[in-house]
């Protein structure tokens, strides 16, 4: 088997970075904030920015989105991310069942590499692939990473990677420990859902019957 594993959301918990950026940008722009739980629920549902910042004018929302997208790729934001509990232990078990390739959708590869090194996660991957910002290229790049292995499993926590995997015709597992709810992951094309990486690994270790029932070739 081959596992193409997303960095943010699957291995690294991006919630602290999201919240820090949201608070600082709203303060700089004089915008009202939601409570932490309400904010993260809205993010995970994929609500528009107008739901996160009630009453803001459209031009303010556009400015907020530009600033936030720049923030989340800074060294400071990535340093604020924390590895998910048991991520290292789960990866140490998963790599016994196939090659593990890290897939990164963000632009700041160096900071993510440093964070993964710090958290003891880098050693579990044969390589790290940063996908192009261009969506069309991303589909081809992801498809190329499977190297015609019919038992390739894309492990994603973001809407972006689930959609790319679906377009590439690859089997995609959705993990709800990241920035998407289970309902959202299911709606956009994840073949099967798990709460976190540890739950997926437990399935693989036990024989992977759930994966095959969901459509992974045996």
Image (cartoon, rainbow, N blue to C red):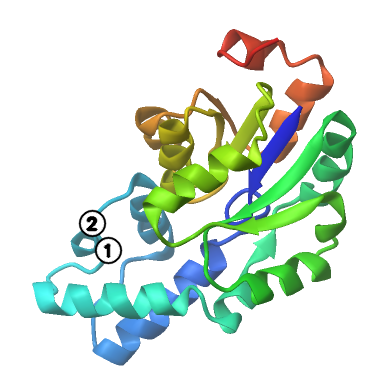
Work out which quarter of the rendered image holds the N terminus and state it. top right
In the rendered structure, the answer to whether residue 133 lies left or right of residue 173 reads left
Apparent side of residue 208 relative to residue 163 in the rendered image (left or right)? right
- What's the CA distance linking mark 1 and mark 2? 7 Å
Q: Quadrant of residue 25?
A: bottom left
Q: At 65% from the left edge and 35% from the top edge, which residue is drawn?
A: 146
> Which element type, helix, strand or loop, lies under badge 2?
loop
Q: Is residue 198 above or below residue 204?
A: below
Compare residues 31 and 204 and report the one nearer the observer. Answer: 204
Q: Quadrant of residue 150?
A: top right
x, y (%) of residue 20?
48, 76
Pick the front one: 50 or 137? 137
Q: What percent of the width, then of the height, locates residue 94?
A: 82, 35
Residue appearing at x 58%, y 52% in the figure: 9
Judge depth for marks 1 and 2 and give the one in front. Answer: 2
CB contact under 8 Å: marks 1 and 2 = yes
Q: Which residue is mark 2?
A: 48
As drawn, the label of residue 52 is: 1
Q: Residues within 10 Å of mark 2 (few under 14, many from 20)?
A: few
């Amino acid at each position: 088997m081959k596992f193409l594993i997303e960095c943010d959301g699957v291995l690294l918990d991006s919630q602290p970075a999201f919240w820090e950026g949201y608070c600082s940008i709203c303060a700089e722009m004089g915008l009202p904030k939601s409570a932490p739980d309400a904010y993260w629920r809205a993010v995970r549902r994929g609500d528009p920015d107008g739901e996160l910042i009630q009453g803001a004018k459209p031009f303010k929302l556009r400015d907020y989105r530009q600033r936030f997208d720049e923030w989340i790729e800074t060294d400071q934001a990535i340093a604020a991310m924390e590895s998910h509990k048991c991520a290292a232990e789960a990866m140490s078990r998963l790599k016994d069942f196939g090659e593990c390739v890290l897939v990164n959708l963000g632009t700041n590869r160096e900071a993510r590499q440093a964070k993964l090194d710090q958290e003891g996660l880098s050693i579990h991957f044969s390589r790290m692939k940063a996908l192009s910002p261009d969506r069309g290229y991303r589909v081809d790049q992801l498809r190329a990473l499977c190297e015609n292995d019919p038992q390739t499993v894309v492990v994603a926590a973001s809407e972006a990677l689930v959609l790319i995997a679906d377009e590439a015709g690859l089997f995609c597992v959705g993990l709800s420990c990241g920035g998407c709810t289970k309902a959202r992951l299911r709606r956009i094309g994840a073949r099967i859902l798990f709460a976190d990486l540890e739950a997926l690994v437990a399935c693989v270790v036990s024989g992977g019957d759930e994966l095959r029932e969901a459509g992974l070739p045996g």
